[in-house]
Image (cartoon, rainbow, N blue to C red):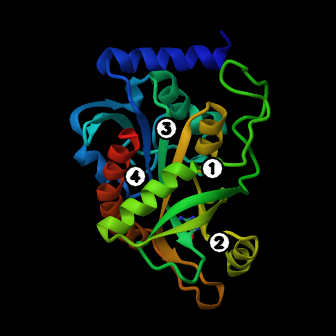
Amino acid sequence: MLGLARQIDEAATMIRQRWPSTPKAGLILGTGLGGLAEQIANKTIIPYAEIPHFPTSTSPSHAGQLVCGELCGVPIVAMEGRFHFYEGYSMQQVTFPVRVMKALGANTLVVTNAAGGMNPHFELSDVVVIDDHINLMGDNPLRGINDDQLGPRFPDMCEPYSRELSTIALQAALELGITAHKGIFVAVTGPNLETRAEYRMLRGMGADVVGMSTVPEVIVAVHAGLRVLGFSIVTDVCLPDALEPVDIQKILAVAAKGGEKLSRLIPQVLARMTAR
Ligand code: HPA
Protein backbone atom coordinates (compact mmCIF):
# COMPACT_ATOMS: atom_id res chain seq x y z
CA MET A 1 0.00 0.00 0.00
CA LEU A 2 1.34 3.44 -0.88
CA GLY A 3 1.66 6.02 1.89
CA LEU A 4 -1.56 7.91 1.19
CA ALA A 5 -3.66 4.73 0.92
CA ARG A 6 -2.29 3.55 4.27
CA GLN A 7 -3.12 6.88 5.93
CA ILE A 8 -6.66 6.79 4.53
CA ASP A 9 -7.07 3.27 5.84
CA GLU A 10 -5.84 4.22 9.32
CA ALA A 11 -8.22 7.19 9.53
CA ALA A 12 -11.19 5.12 8.29
CA THR A 13 -10.41 2.29 10.69
CA MET A 14 -10.41 4.67 13.66
CA ILE A 15 -13.73 6.25 12.59
CA ARG A 16 -15.32 2.81 12.12
CA GLN A 17 -14.33 1.88 15.67
CA ARG A 18 -16.39 4.83 16.97
CA TRP A 19 -19.18 4.66 14.39
CA PRO A 20 -19.58 1.28 12.72
CA SER A 21 -22.26 2.25 10.12
CA THR A 22 -21.62 2.66 6.40
CA PRO A 23 -22.39 6.20 5.23
CA LYS A 24 -24.33 6.70 2.01
CA ALA A 25 -22.96 10.21 1.64
CA GLY A 26 -20.26 12.49 2.92
CA LEU A 27 -21.14 16.15 3.58
CA ILE A 28 -18.81 19.12 3.76
CA LEU A 29 -20.40 22.07 5.55
CA GLY A 30 -18.92 25.38 4.45
CA THR A 31 -18.23 28.65 6.25
CA GLY A 32 -21.19 29.59 8.43
CA LEU A 33 -23.15 26.62 7.07
CA GLY A 34 -22.66 24.21 9.96
CA GLY A 35 -26.31 24.44 11.14
CA LEU A 36 -27.23 21.24 9.35
CA ALA A 37 -25.06 19.28 11.79
CA GLU A 38 -27.60 20.01 14.54
CA GLN A 39 -30.20 18.02 12.64
CA ILE A 40 -28.13 14.87 12.49
CA ALA A 41 -29.73 12.10 14.57
CA ASN A 42 -27.94 9.37 16.58
CA LYS A 43 -24.77 11.45 16.46
CA THR A 44 -21.24 10.35 17.05
CA ILE A 45 -18.93 13.37 17.10
CA ILE A 46 -15.23 12.89 16.46
CA PRO A 47 -12.92 15.94 16.74
CA TYR A 48 -10.49 16.07 13.82
CA ALA A 49 -7.60 16.11 16.27
CA GLU A 50 -8.48 12.52 17.26
CA ILE A 51 -8.48 11.14 13.71
CA PRO A 52 -5.11 9.87 12.48
CA HIS A 53 -3.60 12.00 9.68
CA PHE A 54 -6.46 14.55 9.71
CA PRO A 55 -5.23 18.14 9.64
CA THR A 56 -6.68 20.32 12.41
CA SER A 57 -8.88 23.34 11.70
CA THR A 58 -7.59 26.90 12.27
CA SER A 59 -10.63 28.89 11.15
CA PRO A 60 -12.69 30.44 14.00
CA SER A 61 -16.02 29.84 12.23
CA HIS A 62 -15.23 26.16 11.71
CA ALA A 63 -15.82 23.67 14.48
CA GLY A 64 -13.36 21.05 13.27
CA GLN A 65 -15.20 17.84 13.89
CA LEU A 66 -16.67 14.91 12.03
CA VAL A 67 -20.34 14.39 12.81
CA CYS A 68 -21.52 10.87 11.98
CA GLY A 69 -25.19 9.91 12.14
CA GLU A 70 -28.43 10.03 10.17
CA LEU A 71 -30.34 12.66 8.21
CA CYS A 72 -33.87 11.58 7.26
CA GLY A 73 -32.79 8.07 8.22
CA VAL A 74 -29.86 8.14 5.77
CA PRO A 75 -26.45 7.37 7.32
CA ILE A 76 -24.00 10.18 6.59
CA VAL A 77 -20.69 11.61 7.76
CA ALA A 78 -20.50 15.40 7.88
CA MET A 79 -17.47 17.63 8.16
CA GLU A 80 -18.32 20.53 10.43
CA GLY A 81 -15.44 22.72 9.33
CA ARG A 82 -13.32 22.17 6.28
CA PHE A 83 -9.68 22.81 5.48
CA HIS A 84 -8.93 25.74 3.20
CA PHE A 85 -5.93 26.10 0.91
CA TYR A 86 -5.59 29.72 2.11
CA GLU A 87 -5.01 28.49 5.66
CA GLY A 88 -1.75 27.02 4.41
CA TYR A 89 -2.79 23.39 4.07
CA SER A 90 -1.57 21.49 1.05
CA MET A 91 -4.07 20.33 -1.56
CA GLN A 92 -3.52 16.78 -0.24
CA GLN A 93 -4.46 17.86 3.29
CA VAL A 94 -7.50 19.81 2.09
CA THR A 95 -8.84 16.75 0.28
CA PHE A 96 -7.79 13.96 2.66
CA PRO A 97 -11.23 13.76 4.36
CA VAL A 98 -12.90 13.09 1.00
CA ARG A 99 -10.65 10.05 0.55
CA VAL A 100 -11.66 8.88 4.00
CA MET A 101 -15.38 9.32 3.26
CA LYS A 102 -14.92 7.11 0.21
CA ALA A 103 -13.01 4.52 2.25
CA LEU A 104 -15.88 4.45 4.77
CA GLY A 105 -18.20 3.43 1.92
CA ALA A 106 -19.85 6.71 0.84
CA ASN A 107 -20.69 6.91 -2.85
CA THR A 108 -21.83 10.54 -2.87
CA LEU A 109 -20.28 13.83 -1.74
CA VAL A 110 -22.46 16.81 -0.90
CA VAL A 111 -20.38 19.95 -0.64
CA THR A 112 -21.45 23.45 0.43
CA ASN A 113 -19.74 26.82 0.51
CA ALA A 114 -20.22 30.54 1.01
CA ALA A 115 -19.56 32.37 -2.24
CA GLY A 116 -19.61 35.76 -3.88
CA GLY A 117 -22.43 36.19 -6.40
CA MET A 118 -21.37 37.69 -9.73
CA ASN A 119 -24.49 36.84 -11.71
CA PRO A 120 -26.69 39.94 -11.40
CA HIS A 121 -29.78 37.75 -11.04
CA PHE A 122 -28.51 36.27 -7.79
CA GLU A 123 -29.45 37.79 -4.44
CA LEU A 124 -28.01 37.53 -0.95
CA SER A 125 -28.59 34.15 0.71
CA ASP A 126 -29.79 32.55 -2.55
CA VAL A 127 -28.93 28.90 -3.08
CA VAL A 128 -26.87 28.02 -6.15
CA VAL A 129 -26.71 24.40 -7.30
CA ILE A 130 -23.23 24.11 -8.78
CA ASP A 131 -23.46 23.03 -12.40
CA ASP A 132 -19.75 23.09 -13.22
CA HIS A 133 -16.55 24.71 -12.01
CA ILE A 134 -13.41 26.55 -13.04
CA ASN A 135 -10.22 25.83 -11.10
CA LEU A 136 -8.19 29.03 -10.72
CA MET A 137 -6.38 27.91 -7.58
CA GLY A 138 -3.13 27.36 -9.44
CA ASP A 139 -2.70 23.90 -7.93
CA ASN A 140 -4.31 20.48 -8.11
CA PRO A 141 -4.69 17.81 -5.42
CA LEU A 142 -3.90 15.09 -7.97
CA ARG A 143 -0.47 16.51 -8.84
CA GLY A 144 2.27 13.98 -8.16
CA ILE A 145 2.48 10.21 -8.42
CA ASN A 146 -0.93 8.68 -9.04
CA ASP A 147 -2.04 5.73 -6.92
CA ASP A 148 -4.15 3.74 -9.40
CA GLN A 149 -5.98 2.10 -6.47
CA LEU A 150 -7.43 5.51 -5.59
CA GLY A 151 -8.39 6.59 -9.11
CA PRO A 152 -7.18 7.13 -12.68
CA ARG A 153 -4.24 9.34 -13.70
CA PHE A 154 -6.39 11.50 -15.99
CA PRO A 155 -9.88 11.62 -14.49
CA ASP A 156 -12.62 12.72 -16.83
CA MET A 157 -14.30 16.03 -15.93
CA CYS A 158 -17.17 16.18 -18.39
CA GLU A 159 -19.73 15.95 -15.57
CA PRO A 160 -18.07 16.56 -12.19
CA TYR A 161 -21.42 17.48 -10.62
CA SER A 162 -24.07 14.81 -11.06
CA ARG A 163 -26.85 16.09 -13.28
CA GLU A 164 -29.20 13.60 -11.71
CA LEU A 165 -28.55 14.91 -8.20
CA SER A 166 -28.69 18.55 -9.33
CA THR A 167 -32.09 17.93 -10.87
CA ILE A 168 -33.34 16.35 -7.64
CA ALA A 169 -31.99 19.34 -5.67
CA LEU A 170 -33.60 21.95 -7.94
CA GLN A 171 -36.93 20.10 -7.83
CA ALA A 172 -36.81 19.76 -4.03
CA ALA A 173 -35.94 23.48 -3.69
CA LEU A 174 -38.93 24.39 -5.86
CA GLU A 175 -41.25 22.30 -3.72
CA LEU A 176 -39.87 23.80 -0.49
CA GLY A 177 -40.23 27.36 -1.82
CA ILE A 178 -36.47 27.98 -1.74
CA THR A 179 -35.01 30.13 -4.52
CA ALA A 180 -32.27 28.10 -6.22
CA HIS A 181 -30.27 28.80 -9.36
CA LYS A 182 -27.90 26.69 -11.39
CA GLY A 183 -24.46 28.25 -11.70
CA ILE A 184 -20.77 27.95 -12.52
CA PHE A 185 -18.44 28.16 -9.51
CA VAL A 186 -14.92 29.52 -9.87
CA ALA A 187 -12.38 28.74 -7.16
CA VAL A 188 -9.63 31.20 -6.21
CA THR A 189 -7.05 30.84 -3.47
CA GLY A 190 -8.02 33.84 -1.33
CA PRO A 191 -7.72 34.86 1.42
CA ASN A 192 -8.39 38.36 0.10
CA LEU A 193 -11.65 39.04 -1.67
CA GLU A 194 -11.37 40.02 -5.31
CA THR A 195 -10.70 43.40 -6.85
CA ARG A 196 -13.30 44.91 -9.13
CA ALA A 197 -11.11 44.06 -12.11
CA GLU A 198 -10.90 40.45 -10.94
CA TYR A 199 -14.67 40.11 -10.48
CA ARG A 200 -15.12 41.53 -13.97
CA MET A 201 -12.66 39.00 -15.38
CA LEU A 202 -14.22 36.05 -13.50
CA ARG A 203 -17.70 36.99 -14.65
CA GLY A 204 -16.37 37.36 -18.21
CA MET A 205 -14.97 33.84 -17.99
CA GLY A 206 -18.48 32.54 -17.46
CA ALA A 207 -18.58 32.11 -13.69
CA ASP A 208 -21.67 32.93 -11.61
CA VAL A 209 -20.22 32.50 -8.12
CA VAL A 210 -16.69 32.70 -6.68
CA GLY A 211 -15.25 31.10 -3.57
CA MET A 212 -12.07 29.85 -1.92
CA SER A 213 -12.88 26.16 -1.52
CA THR A 214 -14.77 23.18 -2.93
CA VAL A 215 -12.94 22.61 -6.21
CA PRO A 216 -10.07 20.60 -4.66
CA GLU A 217 -12.52 18.35 -2.80
CA VAL A 218 -14.62 17.88 -5.92
CA ILE A 219 -11.60 16.98 -8.06
CA VAL A 220 -10.64 14.29 -5.54
CA ALA A 221 -14.24 13.07 -5.28
CA VAL A 222 -14.39 12.63 -9.06
CA HIS A 223 -11.00 10.89 -9.00
CA ALA A 224 -12.36 8.53 -6.32
CA GLY A 225 -15.54 7.82 -8.31
CA LEU A 226 -17.95 9.66 -6.00
CA ARG A 227 -21.07 11.37 -7.30
CA VAL A 228 -21.03 15.04 -6.37
CA LEU A 229 -23.72 17.56 -5.49
CA GLY A 230 -22.51 21.10 -4.77
CA PHE A 231 -24.25 24.11 -3.26
CA SER A 232 -23.11 27.70 -2.91
CA ILE A 233 -24.84 30.28 -0.76
CA VAL A 234 -24.49 33.81 -2.13
CA THR A 235 -23.05 35.73 0.82
CA ASP A 236 -22.01 38.93 -0.94
CA VAL A 237 -22.98 40.57 -4.18
CA CYS A 238 -19.95 41.08 -6.41
CA LEU A 239 -21.00 43.41 -9.21
CA PRO A 240 -17.81 45.22 -10.23
CA ASP A 241 -19.52 48.52 -11.00
CA ALA A 242 -21.42 48.64 -7.73
CA LEU A 243 -19.01 46.94 -5.37
CA GLU A 244 -19.23 47.72 -1.69
CA PRO A 245 -16.82 46.68 1.06
CA VAL A 246 -17.86 43.47 2.81
CA ASP A 247 -16.90 42.34 6.24
CA ILE A 248 -16.65 38.76 7.35
CA GLN A 249 -19.32 39.23 10.07
CA LYS A 250 -21.82 40.28 7.41
CA ILE A 251 -20.84 37.30 5.24
CA LEU A 252 -21.35 34.95 8.20
CA ALA A 253 -24.77 36.45 8.98
CA VAL A 254 -25.94 35.93 5.39
CA ALA A 255 -24.40 32.45 5.39
CA ALA A 256 -26.45 31.58 8.47
CA LYS A 257 -29.62 32.54 6.60
CA GLY A 258 -28.59 30.47 3.60
CA GLY A 259 -27.51 27.65 5.87
CA GLU A 260 -31.02 27.45 7.25
CA LYS A 261 -32.26 26.87 3.68
CA LEU A 262 -29.68 24.15 3.09
CA SER A 263 -30.68 22.53 6.38
CA ARG A 264 -34.16 22.06 4.94
CA LEU A 265 -33.05 21.21 1.42
CA ILE A 266 -30.20 18.73 1.88
CA PRO A 267 -32.09 16.17 4.03
CA GLN A 268 -34.85 16.20 1.39
CA VAL A 269 -32.32 15.55 -1.36
CA LEU A 270 -30.74 12.68 0.61
CA ALA A 271 -34.15 11.08 1.18
CA ARG A 272 -35.04 11.31 -2.50
CA MET A 273 -31.62 10.24 -3.69
CA THR A 274 -31.69 6.97 -1.80
CA ALA A 275 -35.32 6.32 -2.71
CA ARG A 276 -34.10 5.55 -6.24
N1 HPA B 1 -14.85 35.97 -3.23
C1 HPA B 1 -14.23 34.86 -2.90
N2 HPA B 1 -14.68 34.05 -1.95
C2 HPA B 1 -15.81 34.38 -1.32
C3 HPA B 1 -16.49 35.53 -1.63
C4 HPA B 1 -15.99 36.38 -2.63
O1 HPA B 1 -16.56 37.42 -2.95
N3 HPA B 1 -17.57 35.56 -0.82
C5 HPA B 1 -17.53 34.48 -0.04
N4 HPA B 1 -16.46 33.74 -0.36
- In the rendered image, residue 120, in percent from the top left (x then y), is placed at 57, 83
- In the rendered image, residue 160, in percent from the top left (x then y), is placed at 64, 47
Mark nearer the N terminus (4 vs 3): 4
Give the quadrant of residue 222.
top right
Between label 3 and label 2, give the one nearer the viewer: 3
Q: Give the quadrant of the C terminus.
A: top left
* Label 1 crowd bin: few (<14), some (14–19), many (20+), radius 10 Å: many
Q: Disc 1, disc 4: CB below 8 Å?
A: no
* Label 2 crowd bin: few (<14), some (14–19), many (20+), radius 10 Å: some
- In the rendered image, residue 255, in percent from the top left (x then y), is placed at 39, 65
Mark nearer the N terminus (2 vs 1): 2
- Ligand 1 closer than 8 Å to label 2 CB: yes
Between label 2 and label 4, give the one nearer the viewer: 2
Above or below, 207 against 62 in this view is below
Above or below, 225 against 157 in this view is above
Three-letter amino acid code at the position of disc 3: Thr
Q: Please give left or right for residue 198 compared with residue 179 in the image.
A: right
| Tag 3 residue | 108
Residue under the point 39% across and 49% down? 62
Q: Kindly report the distance in space between the C-alpha atoms of the residues bearing marks 1 and 4.
A: 22 Å
Above or below, 271 against 187 in this view is above
Three-letter amino acid code at the position of disc 1: Val
Q: Please give left or right for residue 268 compared with residue 30 in the image.
A: left
| Tag 2 residue | 194
* Label 3 crowd bin: few (<14), some (14–19), many (20+), radius 10 Å: many
Disc ID at residue 71: none
Residue under the point 62% across and 30% down? 224
| Tag 1 residue | 215
